[in-house]
Image (spheres, rainbow, N blue to C red):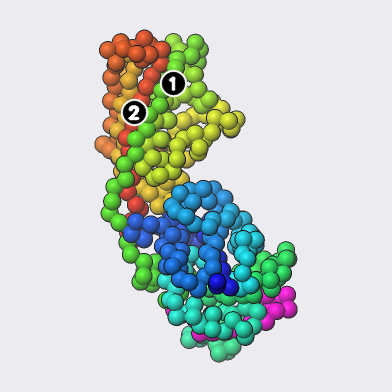
Amino acid sequence: MSDLTLILLAAGASSRFGSEVKKQWIRIGDIPLWQFVTNRFTDDPLFADIVIAAHPEEADYMRQHGDYHIVVGGNSRQASLKAALEAVKTPYVMVSDVARGCIDMALVERLTAAREKADCIVPVLKIHDTVVHDGETVDRDALLRIQTPQLSRTAVLKKALETQTEYTDDSSAVVAAGGTRFFVPGDEKARKLTTLSDLAALECLQPPAPITLVGNGFDVHAFDTKGSMVLCGVPIEHPVGFKAHSDGDVAIHALIDALLGAAGMDDIGTLFPDSNDAYRGIDSTLLLERTCRRLRQYGFEPVNADITIAAQAPKLAKYKAAMRQTIARVAGLPPIRVNVKATTTERLGFVGREEGVAVLASATLKYMDWTQL
């Protein structure tokens, strides 16, 4: 049994990346970066376990990607690391960032081979350019670039992180707590993905797969005896509105389900539960906007939407153009990629009895092409 656990940190906000998509969610072929990096180590007997620290809003969705050991991270690298360490049962732990997508196994072997030499084993690179600090030239031979992964004694690292001081790497915390550090040669290929410009240097990352993902959504709402009616974000002239927790825009609700379905992201009730008073009476265009923003953060791009509204009453022909324009604007699509159809049920069923409205929606997504960002 291995005495080493690998921790992969994937809980960051990706604030420096410079794109709508978070870097841990850019697609490498058909999978997100965090999964690509994890899979590179999954079958290696070197690790007893691989623990992935996820952003609190992303942990459940990450679990849908397979049988991975996901823990909820914190609001900083250090907080996420401490949360992941709680799941570590081995005497040694190796910590890396999923942003380092092209780590070579030779680097991992250098770290493990030196594990007895100090409390924390660290890969480093030398500085080859002249360095100036506050107007003074600095001896570049005295400077080192610290990389991850880093291998530590688990108990020592846990103890070192019992502090309010924030450290940007494990070894700095270990040394500050009185532990020892040993350097091994790093690897230029283990470059960290921080900004969009770094992508060009990470040669192991393949572009996203050119596939289309399809989702369907269906929703119904009964008429209420009061209120106003909104469909596809457009006010409709009708004596009553819908019974609903939000504004009752059944068309947008069906479309949100279609978009979430294409992404494998559950449904509208999970994302915006009607048990949450924050969504009581909310404008459903805001829900659609938040859904599309989340999809883009997770590396998806909406392609088109097709909505069929079944209503015996009211008549909707005069509203369809405005509906198309509204959905297109909110979802960030050209109007031609949004289609809205209205039909009746020939007076059959609850729709035909004018008791409510039913909507069927379809939507397609593609992976955001980060090679073009």
Q: Quadrant of residue 309?
A: top left
Residue 269, above or below 178? above
One can see residue 312 in this view: yes
Dot placed on the residue nearer the N-terminal end, 1 or 2: 1
Q: Is residue 130 magenta?
A: no
Q: What stretch of residues is rendered in magenta? A: 174-188
Picture disc at residue 360: 2
In the image, farthest residue toward the front: 1
Q: Which residue does the image show at 41% across and 48% down from the upper left?
A: 296
Look at the picture and state if 5 lies above or below 111. Answer: above
Asked whether residue 179 is drawn in magenta, I would say: yes
- Kindly identify which numbered label has been placed on residue 86: none
**Mark 1 is on which residue type?**
His
- 360 shown above or below 160: above
Asked whether the viewer can see residue 329, the reply is no
x then y, percent, for residue 14: 50, 58
* Residue 200, image x, y percentages: 36, 69
Residue that mark 1 sits on = 221
**Residue at left offset 30%, top offset 33%:** 306
